[in-house]
Amino acid sequence: MNYDINTIHTFKVEDAIRYGTDKAVILAAIRHFIDVNKWDDNSKYYRSNYYWFCISSKDLSRVLPYFTPSKIQRLLKQLENDRAIVVSVLNDSAFNRTKWYSLPEYYNA
């Protein structure tokens, strides 16, 4: 993934108040990528009544270059513990342990 250093990153103020600004940035990135996947005709991003986004913390740190992969891992774990995100491993290969992320708001029963 490439990133443009001039890209503007935004987040929901409500998320920043509830979880802090670092977690709000992560949530905004997850929302962005899930929204992109929702419009993809490939249904591999829709499983178990959720729309998903799959990325490693290393790749996400390329999108958010002000966070290290280890900081992203910590923030994702905290968001999972806060129940702000839904996490699963939905890869076709048992050897691929890359996590998939969704948000409760993307549940579509």
Image (cartoon, rainbow, N blue to C red):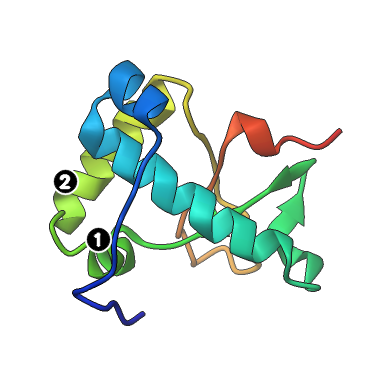
The quadrant in which the N terminus is found is bottom left
Image disc number at residue 64: 1
Identify the amino acid type marked 1: Leu
The quadrant in which the C terminus is found is top right
Query: Can you see residue 91?
Result: no
Q: Position of residue 27 (x, y in %)?
A: 41, 41
Image disc number at residue 75: none
> Relative to residue 22, is residue 17 depicted above or below?
above
Q: Position of residue 23 (x, y in %)?
A: 29, 35
Q: Quadrant of residue 74?
A: top left
Q: Callout 1: helix, strand or loop? A: loop
Say which of marks 2 and 1 sits in front.
1
Query: Can you see residue 50?
Result: yes
Label 2 sits on residue: 71
- 63 sits to left or right of 29: left
Tell me which residue sits at (63%, 55%) in the image: 90
Tell me which residue sits at (36%, 41%) in the image: 11
- 38 sits to left or right of 57: right
Identify the amino acid type marked 2: Lys
